[in-house]
Amino acid sequence: MATALQDTLASEIEAMGRKARAAATALATAPRVLKDEALRAAAATLRRQESAVLAANERDVAAGRARQLTPALLDRLALDSKRIAGIARSLEAIAELGDPVGQEIARWQRPNGLDIARVRTPLGVIGVIYESRPNVTADAGGLCLKAGNAVILRGGSESSHSSAAIHACLVEGLATAGLPVDAIQLVATTDRRAVGHLLALSRYVDVIVPRGGRSLIERVQAEARMPVFAHLDGICHVYLHSSADPAMARAIALNAKMRRTGICGAMETLLCDRSVAGALLPPILDDLARAGCELVGDAEVMALDPRVGAATEEDWRTEYLDAILSVKLVDGLEEAIGHIEAHGSHHTDSIVAGDQGAAATFLARVDSAIVMHNASTQFADGGEFGMGAEIGISTGRMHARGPVGVEQLTSFKYQVRGNGQTRPG
């Protein structure tokens, strides 16, 4: 019986792959006007269906509480009117973006008269595997559509009802525009074996994007038969240089950690130059503690505030995704960069500094997908970058690094125009 069920599930996922490939073929040449119409219609449907989406989300949140999900995970899962309006606006913002498909990246002529152009093309079929954030359903579906790709979405069991309700709005948008409804598909089952079947579907799926915790991403990277856009951890640092403006440092540190603790762009380690720690850190530590943040640090940081616990070596390489922060003193820029390289995850790191030379060195030498100067790491988001939204953050070194938006969801091909040239022997 188990084998029969497994075969049935494998067949269902393969059928989704076939339908996605057919839809991708149609989308590759779909005009921008139809893609934008589908996105705007989906946003309008989402607004009309707000009560149904909220009811579906309440089922997920209630189940999450029963499963004793952490407050950070419940925050990722929960929707309200404001967040639904934000999802709808995100779809509309994607519609406003330029269409990358067919965009000429470069063009040149050879001495023999050949005219060569490098032109953006869709990747094809994208698989997106995510956990508790139902807004990913809309962001991933919308971005893939805009870039001319079909997408197979597989949300986590904890957000299954919310994702299904949002997916229905996307499908209605596609139908309104006359585009293939199979362009955005959602794996309906919560059976974890579906993930394995999707990861093996290299015949139909061109790229996999995982969004979730370490265990999910490790599994995807180990099992996927196709390229993966992913980051394993978001161990983000804010470094307070000796030239940092105290008021700016205070505001950035509090925001980088406490605005939303459960996102991958949240600061997990605060570094501060030893030479200014006595003056700079106490009010920052007080702000964080008063906001409900648990603090751990080295012995010198502990001496500055009795609320700071002892940090272990493991703390420097931990993504808390919660109201916990590790704090460490360093002897200047070189040690800060060395600590980030040794303990970071190449996601997002920021320096707060008035010294422009120090900032330039930090931006050039820190090998992360996103490096910042005098800004909160919470800006590590495709929407904040003007991309409309993002399908995820990639810390790899392939063509997609940092927020993965519509341009990163394209490849390119060469269009070569001649007038009868033949290559000499």
Image (cartoon, rainbow, N blue to C red):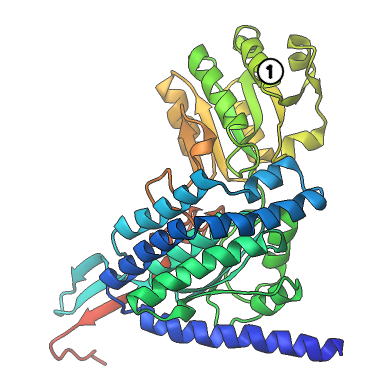
Report x, y in % for residue 214.
72, 54
Q: Quadrant of the N terminus?
A: bottom right
**Does any portion of residue 35 appear in the rendered image?**
yes
Taking depth in this image into account, of 92 and 29 the one nearest to the observer is 92
Instruction: Name which residue lies at 76% across and 44% down.
Output: 70
Furthest toward the top, the residue is 279
Amino acid type assigned to the residue bearing label 1 in the image: Arg
Instruction: Name which residue lies at 71% across and 64% down.
Output: 157
- Please say if 240 is above or below 207: above
Report x, y in % for residue 191.
75, 73
Q: Quadrant of residue 416?
A: bottom left
Report x, y in % for residue 67.
82, 53
Q: Quadrant of the C terminus?
A: bottom left
Residue at which label 1 appears? 290
Q: Secondary structure at mark 1?
A: helix
Q: Quadrant of residue 258?
A: top right
Instruction: Name which residue lies at 66% across and 48% down.
Output: 233
In-image side of 410 versus 362 (left or right): left
- Please say if 319 is above or below 115: above
Q: Quadrant of residue 384?
A: top left
In-image side of 160 versus 311 (left or right): left
Instruction: Name which residue lies at 47% across and 30% down.
Output: 375
Report x, y in % for residue 294.
75, 26
Taking depth in this image into account, of 356 and 425 the one nearest to the observer is 356
Pointer 1 local density, CA inside 10 Å: few below 14, some 14–19, many at least 20? few
In-image side of 114 versus 75 (left or right): left
**Does any portion of residue 209 appear in the rendered image?**
no
